[in-house]
Structures are given as C-alpha cells and as structure tokens.
Image (tube, grey):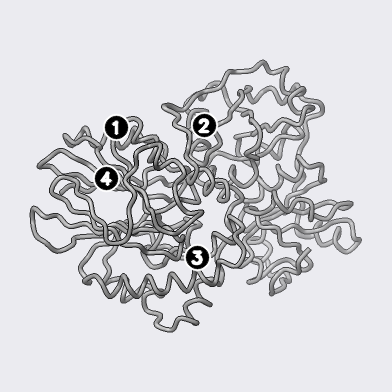
C-alpha cells in the first residue's frame, strides 16, 4: 500500500492518494480542483486513479472530485447519508457509487470500510483502511473534517455559514455521539489522516502535524477527552472563528455539482483605458498588490485582495459570486496572474472577464490613497466625534480585548453586513497585525466610506499600553 499527502497551504487543506502497488489502482480522497497533481503523482508511482471519494460536502473549497473523475475515468464514491438536502445532486448523472454506514469497497488489495461520522455535517463519512496484503486489521482512517490533530470539525457551519437555523446545538450533540462511537470501534494504533491542518476555519485549534493516531488523540485531543455531553457542546461551540462569506457558496456548489474546468483559463488582457469605464459601471476589479501599495495609490472602487497565504480566504470574503470580475495585475509576472486565477478557482470564482495592467490606475479618475493614522490621531478624532473604529478581527478576538468604543465587523462577514456599518464619519479600520485590514479597507472604500488605517493595528495599540475594553460586541 502506498500513501501520499497533498497539502494546499492557502486553504490549509489536505488530500490523500492511496495506491495498491500490486494492481496499480489508486484512490484519491477529498481532492481539490488542481487535479493534475494527483494524476502526475499516481503516474510517477506506476498507478492510475481508479477511485475518487469525498468524506463530505466541503464548505471551504470547491471539490475536485468531479474534475478528477472526468479527467481519469475514475469512479466517484460519495455519501448517501444525511437525509434530504445533504445528497449530491449530480451523483446519478455521474454514475457515482453511493455509500452508507457499513459499506465497503476495494482499491486493489486495500479494503476501505465506510463509517458514518456526522456532526460536522449530516452526511460526513470516515474511511477505515485495511491493507489486506499485510493483515486483516485497520491501518488508518481518512477522517475528513471529523477528527483533526488536536481538535474536531466544527458543528456550527451549517447555521453560521449556510444559514440552516437551529442546527448548531443538534450538530454538536451528534458530533459527541459520533466521537464516542468512533473511539470505541477502533484501536489506539490506528493512524488518522485528516483533511485540514493549522489555519483552517473548519475548526478552532487544529494542530500542524500532518497526521496522528487515535491513541495520541485520546490523550491530547480535548474533544475525545471530554466525557460530558453538555460540557462538550458548550466547548465546541465557543470561540469558533467567523466563517468567510464564501463558505455558503461552497456548500451549494459542491452539493449541486462543480463545473468541470479542464484547465485554468487566463482571460483576455484589456486596454488600460477600459478601467475607468469598468469602475463607472460598478464592475468588480481586484487589485492584487500588497496592502501598502494599495494604500499608497489605487483606483477608487477597486477591491484590495493582496496575494499571499490568505489570498483565497480574503477573496472569498469580499468578492461577489453573482457577477464577473476583473484583475489588476503586473504584466511582467504572468505566473503570478496564473497563480491568482488558480487560487480563485479553488473557491469557485471562475468568472474572470479580463485583466488589466496595474499601471492603468494612473488613468483612473483621481487615483486615491488610504491615510494611516497614529493612535494619538485616532484618539483625537474619536474625542471630537469625527471617527468610528471598525475592528475586523474575529468575534473571539474582539471579546478578549478591543479599542474603546470599537465596532466589531469580522472580515468574513463584512460584505453581508456592510449596510450596518455606521456612515457619516471617518472609519478607522484595523485587524490584529495588518493582513485582514486591507481587504476590509478595499471593500469599504468601494462602498463609498471614508476610510483610514490604524498604524500598527491592534497589536501595536495593545503593546503601547493604551486602554482596551473587554467583552462581546453590542449588535448593530
């Protein structure tokens, strides 16, 4: 048996290739849309991808299962658990094998047993792997978003991201039961191969190790150690980060059927003089430069989504899904443009209508800048009633300490709450250390708000010993 892990740093997402060397068959579990990596890795090992499986309907990226099956001719294996509303709408059309608890399938000499492990989502499955060429005991489990290193999948996403009211607590109780059943069914030595690592918004305290064992998690994973259901429910729902706006789109796309791209398409290059007209029409234009460059000079109405580790998450928080978008990019760095298009496709932003060279901002009407205010300037403006402070960190961060009188608008939900942002004053925008502030600044300026950035953000404010307040935000 061969096992290979693929990790996308920007999505904090792990996918897995399992192969049987004896028969040349291979299974890919929870692939993303960059499917060439799996085909190439399998070929390098003398394998062919014959099976593609998903643990659940993902909320944080567009699944590549359909894409990979279309490219290789592999058979899809999808959950048939969870009841109405949680079944794959494209399963019959694509000839998928539908899986229920207790089912199994084989990848050459490797047996894969199906365990229904709901809680994170109603349809969630875990895949228990036995290498029958070496023995009849399980070697590991693909746990998806069920059990992570040091944490478990959050049960609140259906309510907080997909807006299924009243599902958080019931999901938490279901997750507790699934954990008890899982822990009772398997031995300590079994390896656990999860679908996410540190930085994922699918949990709140994921470890950075690529894999773990059930025995280790019994000792050090708080969720497996907690034996009281009520205490577990309180703990698993507390302090979860705000899910980005795009998570609701991912659920819909992955349930109904992601489009098969075949390749990442580079849209046409547009003439620089098109930029003013696009902005006048209200088009979505994404500036890919670092936040500092955007702050120094940008075209009014453009969004700031700096390229970097958090690019897909930031883009999914501020870029609308219901219209085409355009990119401002550096023509001397074509690979950076391709990387941006690849990352956007990973979260279902496929409709790139064109790109314009970044120097075109010089032709926009009155290029703008974002002032940076010192802590003293912020204090003075607040004292005179000229400014409001907008904190775009997560609610748990805000509750642990924030600037006096600040408003909490977490970046992941800012786009849907922009109508609640106070008007009539200058907005002082900040996050913890700067990275989340720029997408928020771009979004707010695009909506016509006068915006400045707090120098040093919250970290510098606190380090300077300035006053802070504790407690949750007052609803707007």
Nearer mark to the viewer, of 3 and 4: 3
In this view, 135 is above or below 22: below
Distance between the Cα atoms at labels 2 and 4?
25 Å
Q: Residue furthest right?
A: 384
Crowding around mark 1 (Cα neighbors within 10 Å: few <14, some 14 to 19, many 20+) is some
Crowding around mark 3 (Cα neighbors within 10 Å: few <14, some 14 to 19, many 20+) is many
Q: Nearer the viewer, residue 179 or 345?
A: 179
Nearer mark to the viewer, of 4 and 1: 1
Which of the two labelled residues, at mark 2 and mark 3, occupies the earlier sequence position?
Answer: 3
Q: Which residue lies at the image location 77% right of the left edge and 27% below the top edge?
A: 281
Name the residue that disc number 2 marks.
341
Position of the C terminus, as image quadrant, is bottom right
In this view, 434 is above or below 351: below
Query: Residue 412 vs residue 122: left or right?
Result: right
Distance between the Cα atoms at labels 3 and 4?
27 Å
Name the residue that disc number 4 marks.
17
């Amino acid at each position: 048996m061969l096992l290979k892990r693929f990790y996308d740093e920007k999505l904090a997402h792990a996918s897995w290739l399992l192969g049987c060397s004896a028969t040349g068959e291979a299974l890919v579990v929870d692939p993303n849309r960059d499917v060439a990596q799996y085909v190439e890795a399998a070929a390098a090992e003398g394998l062919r991808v014959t099976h593609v499986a998903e643990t659940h309907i993902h909320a944080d990226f567009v699944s590549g299962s359909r894409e990979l099956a279309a490219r290789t001719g592999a058979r899809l294996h999808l959950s048939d658990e969870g009841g109405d509303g949680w079944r794959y709408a494209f399963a019959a059309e694509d000839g998928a094998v539908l899986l229920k608890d207790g089912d199994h399938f084989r990848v050459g000499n490797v047996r894969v047993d199906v365990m229904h492990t709901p809680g994170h989502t109603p349809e969630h499955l875990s895949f228990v792997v036995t290498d029958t060429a070496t023995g009849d005991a399980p070697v590991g489990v693909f746990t998806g978003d069920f059990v992570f290193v040091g944490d478990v999948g959050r049960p609140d996403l259906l309510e907080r991201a997909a807006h299924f009211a009243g599902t958080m607590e019931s999901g938490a109780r279901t997750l507790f039961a699934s954990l008890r059943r899982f822990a009772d069914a398997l031995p300590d030595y079994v390896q656990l191969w999860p679908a996410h690592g540190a930085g994922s918004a699918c949990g709140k305290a994921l470890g950075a190790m690529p894999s773990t064992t059930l025995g280790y998690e019994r000792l050090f994973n708080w969720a497996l150690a907690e034996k009281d259901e009520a205490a577990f429910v309180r703990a698993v729902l507390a302090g979860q980060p705000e899910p980005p706006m795009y998570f609701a789109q991912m659920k819909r796309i992955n349930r109904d059927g992601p489009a098969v791209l075949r390749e990442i398409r580079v849209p046409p290059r547009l003439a620089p003089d098109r930029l003013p007209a696009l902005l006048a029409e209200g088009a979505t234009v994404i500036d890919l430069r670092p936040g500092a460059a955007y702050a120094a000079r940008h075209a009014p109405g453009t969004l700031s989504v700096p390229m970097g580790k958090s690019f897909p998450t930031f883009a999914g928080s501020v870029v609308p899904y219901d219209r085409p978008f355009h990119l401002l990019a550096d023509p001397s760095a074509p690979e950076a443009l391709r990387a941006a298009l690849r990352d956007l496709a990973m979260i279902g932003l496929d409709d790139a209508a064109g790109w314009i060279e970044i120097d075109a901002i010089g032709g926009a009407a009155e290029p703008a800048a974002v002032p940076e205010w010192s802590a003293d300037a912020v204090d003075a403006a607040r004292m005179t009633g000229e400014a409001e402070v907008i904190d775009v960190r997560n609610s748990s961060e805000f509750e642990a300490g924030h600037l006096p009188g600040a408003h909490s608008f977490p970046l992941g939900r800012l786009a849907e709450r922009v109508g609640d942002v106070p008007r009539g004053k200058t907005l002082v925008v900040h996050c913890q250390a700067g990275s989340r502030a720029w997408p928020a600044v771009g979004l707010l300026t695009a909506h016509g708000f006068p915006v400045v950035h707090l120098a040093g953000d919250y970290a510098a404010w606190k380090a300077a010993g300035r006053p802070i307040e504790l407690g949750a935000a007052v609803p707007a």
